[in-house]
Amino acid sequence: MPTATDDKYSRGVLGVRTGSERYPGAAVLGVEAAHRAGIGMVRYVGPPTPAGLVLAARPETVTSAGRVQAWLIGSGTDPADRTDAETAALRGILAEGVPVIVDAGALDLAAHAEVPLIVTPHAREHATLRRMLGLGATGDPALVGGVDDPDDHARRHAAAETARALDGVVVLKGSRTVVATPDGWTAVVDAGTPWLATAGTGDVLAGAIGAVVASTAEHGVAPALAAAAGVWLHGRAAALAAAEHGERGGPITALDVAANLPRAAGEALAAHA
Ligand SMILES: NC(=O)C1=CN([C@@H]2O[C@H](COP(=O)(O)OP(=O)(O)OC[C@H]3O[C@@H](n4cnc5c(N)ncnc54)[C@H](O)[C@@H]3O)[C@@H](O)[C@H]2O)[C@@H](O)CC1
Ligand SMILES: Nc1ncnc2c1ncn2[C@@H]1O[C@H](COP(=O)(O)OP(=O)(O)O)[C@@H](O)[C@H]1O
């Protein structure tokens, strides 16, 4: 909650290095979500095509370098396309000191991070990450966490094991998203609506988590709690967006989710007044 003494810097600055020539839209979605989730400033540093689209959609975004309270990397990128210079830049971010949210195409770099880390894999990415870390298979990702596992026991166990091996927070996405820490703490956040399963909503989630982490990092909020708050805001925003289309909800897009983040944040603040 901002106060009269706040300014754009004290409210948190998120650095975003996402998107590529192949997936420029992911950069737009993450930046949009970060702005909508209540950040003081977003600094975007990425390739020319996504940078142009980000500025067109959100001229509020700053594209010059400077201090940030957290970084978001990886959304809309593929490690197979990554240049050595880009890998070096990402490794630099992963050694800088502030928390880093690592999504999609940067997950392969997460294992050697020296900073507070939050990784946001979906089931397939989680399986790949576990293989990289020398951990066992979690079973068929499509089945684990299904009707046979109503308490998400297997997913919570696997996410906590991955978190321990990484020494970072794991946000294992799905209809119920598991947040797990290296010491074995887990939380499960229900998405709120199955309409959320649509392209780009993971990029929105990464931006929302990035905003919450950046705006709370210097207030002593644990990264796992900030991540769980981001997941809740995202799910609630999706439910609000879907509810606009009637009692059973209706189709939503990733941008609809981002557009409803302010209402979700307002509800959360009102509930804790
Ligand atoms: N607008 C954008 O720019 C978007 C960019 N995105 C980015 O796209 C990249 C790839 O993410 P994904 O989550 O798609 O990667 P996945 O690891 O889920 O998928 C990899 C491959 O699996 C196969 N596959 C997965 N599900 C399939 C299905 N239902 N039917 C057929 N084939 C299937 C496809 O060959 C796909 O290319 C990430 O960097 C992500 O951030 C996505 O978030 C979508 C939106
Ligand atoms: N069946 C579902 N019901 C509700 N939410 C879902 C469901 N499947 C996936 N999600 C959510 O949708 C988002 C999808 O993210 P992701 O898989 O990274 O997609 P993308 O890469 O297209 O952005 C995540 O927040 C995930 O928790």
Image (cartoon, rainbow, N blue to C red):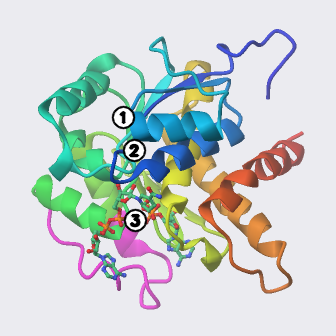
Q: Nearer the viewer's eye, disc 3 or disc 2?
A: 2
Camera-nearest residue between 102 and 149: 102
User: Which numbered disc, 1 or 2, marks the residue that appears first in the sequence?
Assistant: 2
User: Cβ–Cβ below 8 Å for labels 3 and 2?
Assistant: no
Q: Is residue 164 above or below residue 67?
A: below
Q: Is residue 143 magenta?
A: yes
User: Cβ–Cβ below 8 Å for labels 1 and 2?
Assistant: yes
- The quadrant holding residue 159 is bottom left
Secondary structure of the residue carrying numbered label 1:
loop
Secondary structure of the residue carrying numbered label 2:
loop
| Apparent side of residue 119 relative to residue 34 in the rendered image (left or right) | left
Q: Give the range drawn in magenta.
A: 135-157
Residue located beneath label 2 in the image: 19
Residue located beneath label 3 in the image: 156
Q: Residues within 10 Å of mark 2 (few under 14, many from 20)?
A: many
Q: Residues within 10 Å of mark 1 (few under 14, many from 20)?
A: some
Residue located beneath label 1 in the image: 47
As measured in the structure, the alpha-carbon distance from the residue carrying label 3 to the one carrying label 1 is 36 Å
User: Which numbered disc, 3 or 1, marks the residue that appears first in the sequence?
Assistant: 1
